[in-house]
Image (cartoon, rainbow, N blue to C red):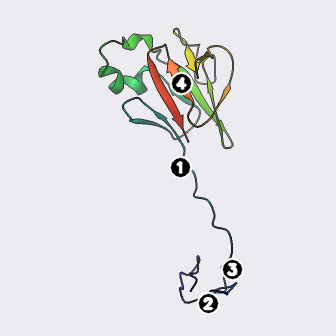
């Protein structure tokens, strides 16, 4: 017996194309789950959600994590270290003059070991590693 994805009626014959209760099509492909947004994963597995864009990431967003590190001076992370923007379903990172960031970070931002400071927008992909000032590595997750 086939369950109906619309009304949950579960007594539809296996060879049915439509629900006998509500008439919904039973053979449609399931819709993918809606994405809930991106996150930046810190080394301690805590998350910084990217709930809206543009979003500036800097010392304040990392403060709780930075307090746990003994060998990193929090001041190497700029107040506005980099900006994440979103266009449609794509995310971008930029370390430079943006709508919300007044200047590039002093100690640079690296995307997968490439310095992106003052190099414009770079597309982010799931699993990309963002290194702030050669001190803190974040992983971008969709």
Residue hosting label 2: 13
- Of labels 2 and 1, earlier in sequence is 2
Question: Nearer the observer, disc 1 or disc 4?
Answer: 4
Per the model, the C-alpha gap separating discs 2 and 1 is 35 Å
- Of labels 1 and 4, earlier in sequence is 1
Question: Nearer the observer, disc 3 or disc 1?
Answer: 3
Q: Measuring 58% from the left and 80% from the top, which residue is drawn there?
A: 4
| CB contact under 8 Å: marks 4 and 3 | no
Per the model, the C-alpha gap separating discs 4 and 3 is 45 Å
Per the model, the C-alpha gap separating discs 1 and 4 is 21 Å
- Regarding mark 2 in the picture, which secondary structure is present there? loop
- Regarding mark 1 in the picture, which secondary structure is present there? loop
Please tell me how crowded label 1 is: few (under 14), some (14-19), or many (20+) other residues with Cα within 10 Å.
few
Q: Residue furthest top?
A: 106
27 on left or right of 112: right
Per the model, the C-alpha gap separating discs 4 and 2 is 53 Å
Residue hosting label 1: 36
| CB contact under 8 Å: marks 1 and 4 | no
- Of labels 3 and 2, earlier in sequence is 2
Please tell me how crowded label 3 is: few (under 14), some (14-19), or many (20+) other residues with Cα within 10 Å.
some
Tell which of 131 and 15 is nearer to you. Answer: 15
Q: Quadrant of residue 41?
A: top left
- Of labels 4 and 2, earlier in sequence is 2
- Regarding mark 4 in the picture, which secondary structure is present there? strand
- Of labels 4 and 3, earlier in sequence is 3
Residue hosting label 4: 130
Tell which of 27 and 5 is nearer to you. Answer: 27
Per the model, the C-alpha gap separating discs 3 and 2 is 13 Å
Residue hosting label 3: 25
């Amino acid at each position: 017996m086939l369950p109906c994805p619309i009304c949950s009626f579960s007594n539809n014959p296996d060879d049915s194309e439509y629900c006998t209760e509500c008439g919904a099509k039973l053979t449609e492909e399931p819709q993918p789950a809606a994405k809930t947004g991106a996150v930046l994963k810190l080394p301690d597995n805590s998350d910084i959600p990217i709930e809206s864009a543009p979003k500036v990431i800097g010392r304040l967003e990392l403060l709780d994590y930075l307090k746990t590190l003994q060998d990193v001076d929090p001041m190497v992370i700029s107040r506005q270290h980099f900006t994440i923007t979103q266009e449609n379903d794509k995310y971008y990172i930029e370390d430079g003059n943006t709508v919300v960031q007044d200047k590039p970070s002093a100690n640079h931002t690296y995307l997968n070991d490439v310095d992106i400071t003052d190099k414009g927008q770079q597309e982010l992909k799931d699993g990309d590693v963002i290194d702030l000032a050669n001190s803190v590595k974040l992983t971008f997750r969709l």
